[in-house]
Amino acid sequence: MVPEPPERPDETRFRERIARQAARRRGDRRTPPHEAWIGIGAMGVVGWSVALPTVLGVLAGLWLDHALPQPFSWTLAGMLAGLALGCLNAWHWVSTQREPCDRDREPGEKDHD
């Protein structure tokens, strides 16, 4: 019986990449194929994470305009602060949702299989 030659490093990386892709696909089969609803839900989360702080900033600004009149608009300042906070919140949420996908991806691998 002749022993098999040892695997080369590039073959090992190839086998590992194929195994990761197969595991990902198996995981995709376990989840329901309602990608459109998942996308709409993600847009809803991102939308609300921006809209809610913006509206709260406007409401706080309206209250401050009434309580502490100034030559500048507290409402506009509150809206801009709420919008900035909401955008940062949405960016953080999207980046945390993307981390599991990025962890499994090879450096030169495309976004889809």
Image (cartoon, rainbow, N blue to C red):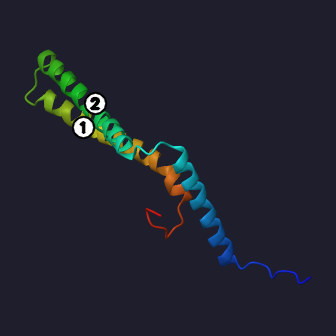
Above or below, 74 against 67 in this view is below
For the point 20% across and 37% down, the residue is 80
Q: Secondary structure at mark 1?
A: helix
| Local secondary structure at mark 2 | helix
Q: Quadrant of the N terminus?
A: bottom right
Point 47% across, 64% down: residue? 113
Res. 72 image quadrant: top left
Q: Nearer the viewer, residue 87 or 65?
A: 87
Q: Residue furthest top?
A: 67
**Residue beneath the point at 51% across and 43% down:** 31
Residue closest to the eye, 64 or 93: 93
| Residue type indicated by callout 1 | Leu
Q: Residue tagged by mark 2?
A: 53
Residue type at tag 2: Pro
Q: Residues within 10 Å of mark 1 (few under 14, many from 20)?
A: many
Q: Earlier in the sequence, mark 1 or mark 2?
A: 2
Relative horizontal placement of residue 12, taking residue 105 as reference (left or right): right
Residue 39 coordinates in the image, percent (x, y): 35, 44
Q: Position of residue 49 (x, y in %)?
A: 32, 35
User: Residue lying farthest left?
Assistant: 71
Q: Residue at x 11, y 29 (%)?
A: 73
Q: Residues within 10 Å of mark 2 (few under 14, many from 20)?
A: many
- Check contact, mark 1 vs mark 2: CB within 8 A: yes
According to the image, label 1 marks what residue? Answer: 83
Residue 14 image offset from top left, x and y in percent: 62, 72
Does residue 59 appear to the left or right of 34 in the view shown?
A: left
